[in-house]
Structure formats: structure tokens, C-alpha cells
Image: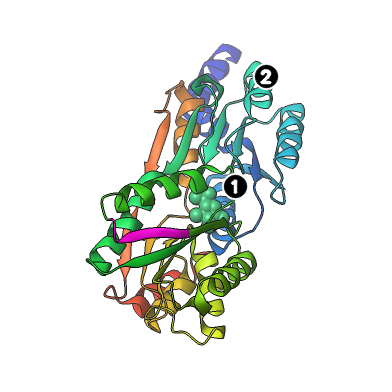
Amino acid sequence: MKRKLLAASSVACLMLCGAAFAADLTVGFSQIGSESGWRAAETTVTQQQAKERGIDLKFADAQQKQENQIKAVRGFIAQGVDAILIAPVVATGWDEVLTEAKDAEIPVILLDRQIDAPEDLYLTAVTSDQVYEGKVAGEWLVKEIGDQACKVVELQGTTGSSPAINRKKGFEEAIAAKSNITIARSQTGDFTRTKGKEVMESFIKAENGGKDICAVYAHNDDMAVGAIQAIKEAGLKPGTDIKVVSIDAVPDIFLAMAEGEANATVELTPNMAGPAFDVLEKFKADGTVPPKWIQTESKLFTQADDPKGVYESKKDLGY
Ligand code: GYE
């Protein structure tokens, strides 16, 4: 009788324990901070995704500092979590702490930014192709401007972060063959509205009150929104006197587009955690090793794409 019960319970376990195991995962998430609307949405979506899957998510906000991220990751290792998600603020300086996670046999998944480290130090990275995003933005401008002479000012993302490095590179590649388009000024606005506005004000001052600027390329929408404000305060028309192209596709940029004040954006999904948890659950259940890079889509939106409608469809999605 006892034996039968045991046999029956192990069959039941075979069927259910896998699912229960996946449902019992504890995952640490080292988030960068909340510098942008996109970042806030990513945090919300990650929390929603964890909840839906019964994952216990330990959240740590690094307030833009890599040292805080390293501390958080060490904390997660000490707690013995089942996996760690990191949105790495900068690309370098990760080898040591990732080796510690590897030694503790805790898989690490990178979210939304890439790093310069040996690939065996993390399970996978869920990101967009950031060089491509820059290219899409640059190609849009090339088409828009034609053969007109065009001085561009660039608002870079956080210095040393993979999106800042790659979005710059992609844009430069797209305009390389066009001698009429030049990047006159380029500076970091740290992915925030406030700094985007500040830096744009200084660009405007330096470029004949903004009259010499033909377009602003911002590495994210938040900086573009800040720049739009600066352009208006200088008495110029954003979207017309100065074209505005950026990346992320957050709801607010669609409002600006609907007003004719922004011209184009490249969409970045805030749902990096969904694909990350999918592969993590498989990895934990049967050892399936995911590809090193899970690439999310990048789609161009312009004023022709019903910005008001897109705004309505996006505004409740955790932004
Ligand atoms: O585009 C920006 C941000 O890491 C790709 O980080 C991400 C970027 C995103 O805060 O808004």
C-alpha cells in the first residue's frame, strides 16, 4: 500500500513538480533607475511578467550607478536566487561580478543593454539592435532632407552605455555618404528630459539662436521631449524649423508628433522580461540553452502613422 502511494505520488510529481519548480523561481533584478519613460515602463512590465508567472522578483534600483548594481548582484548571489536580470548601465566593468555569479551557478540575463565581457559569463541578452536603431533614424533624416545642407545636433545617451555608443555609430553610418548632412554638436543628455533640455539650450545658444540647426537626433524620446521644450522657448518651431528624430516610441513622443513637434521615432519594446523569463523557465526545466542574443524589433514611426491613435493604444501599457 505504502509503495503504491509512493509510486502514485512520484508520478504526480513528475507531472506537477516541473511546473511547481518553474513557479517557485526567485529572480533578482538589478534595474538602472528611472531616467526615462521607457525605463519606467520596462520596470512595470517586468514586475507584471514576474507576477503572471508566479516568479518572486527581488527588485533593486541602482540610481544610475554601476557600483550599486554590482552591490545588488552580490546581494542576490548571497541570497541564493535562481537567476539574476541586469540592465547594465554601462558596457564595461562586469567581468568580476559576473564571474562570481557563474561560480555560484546562478544564470544571468542581460536586459536592454549589451556589455563588453566574455559571452560565457551570461546566459543571454535580450536587447534591440542598437546600431540598427541609429541607422533607421539616420536613414529617415537622409530621406527627409534630400540634398539640402543640414547641421544636426546630437543628444547622446548615458556615456559608456551600449545604446549611446551604438545609436551614435548607426546614425553616423547612415549619413556617412551624405556630405550635406553633418553632426555639428554632440553631447550626452544622459537619457533624461532635464539634461536633454539643458544641452539643447546650449546647442541653440552656440548655433545662432538655433537658426543654424536643421535637426536634432536624440538617443531617446525623453531627451527629444526636453529638446522640443528648449526649441519652443527659443522661439522656434520644433518639427518644422528644427526636425526632431529619436528612439523608444514612448507615448509622449506621439503626442508631440500629433502636434507636429516631433517627426520620427524608432520603437523599442519595454517587454524585455517576457522573452527573458521564457528562456529562463526552459533553461531551468530541462537545460535548454538559449541563443546569446534575443533581438527585439525596431520599427520606425512618423507623423504619417496616426500618432494620436498610437498614443491612445500605448498610454496604459505601463508607461
Ligand atoms: O532607450 C532609454 C533608456 O537601455 C535601450 O535606456 C535602453 C535605453 C532606452 O533609458 O530610454
**Mark 1 CB within 8 Å of ligand 1:** no
The residue that appears at 41% across and 33% down in the rendered structure is 293
In the rendered image, residue 137, in percent from the top left (x then y), is placed at 35, 58
Picture layout, residue 247 above or below residue 256 = above
- Which three-letter amino acid code belongs to the residue tagged 2? Ala
Is 142 magenta? The answer is no
In the rendered image, residue 51, in percent from the top left (x then y), is placed at 58, 50
- Quarter of the rendering containing residue 103: top right
Q: Secondary structure at mark 1?
A: loop
Is 182 magenta? The answer is yes
Q: Label 2 vs label 1: CA separation?
A: 31 Å
Identify residue for label 1.
159
- Quarter of the rendering containing residue 43: bottom right
> Residue 225 versus residue 168: which sits nearer the camera?
168
> Residue 224 versus residue 288: which sits nearer the camera?
224
Magenta region: 179-184
The residue that appears at 67% across and 53% down in the rendered structure is 33
The crowding category of the residue bearing disc 1, from other C-alpha atoms within 10 Å (few below 14, some 14 to 19, many at least 20), is some
Picture layout, residue 240 above or below residue 310 = below
Q: Which mark is residue 103?
A: none
- Which three-letter amino acid code belongs to the residue tagged 1? Thr
- Horizontally, is 223 left or right of 294 in the view? right
Q: Earlier in the sequence, mark 2 or mark 1?
A: 2
In the rendered image, residue 166, in percent from the top left (x then y), is placed at 44, 44
The residue lying furthest to the bottom in this view is: 235
The overriding secondary structure of the stretch rendered in magenta is: strand
Q: Which mark is residue 104?
A: 2
The crowding category of the residue bearing disc 2, from other C-alpha atoms within 10 Å (few below 14, some 14 to 19, many at least 20), is few
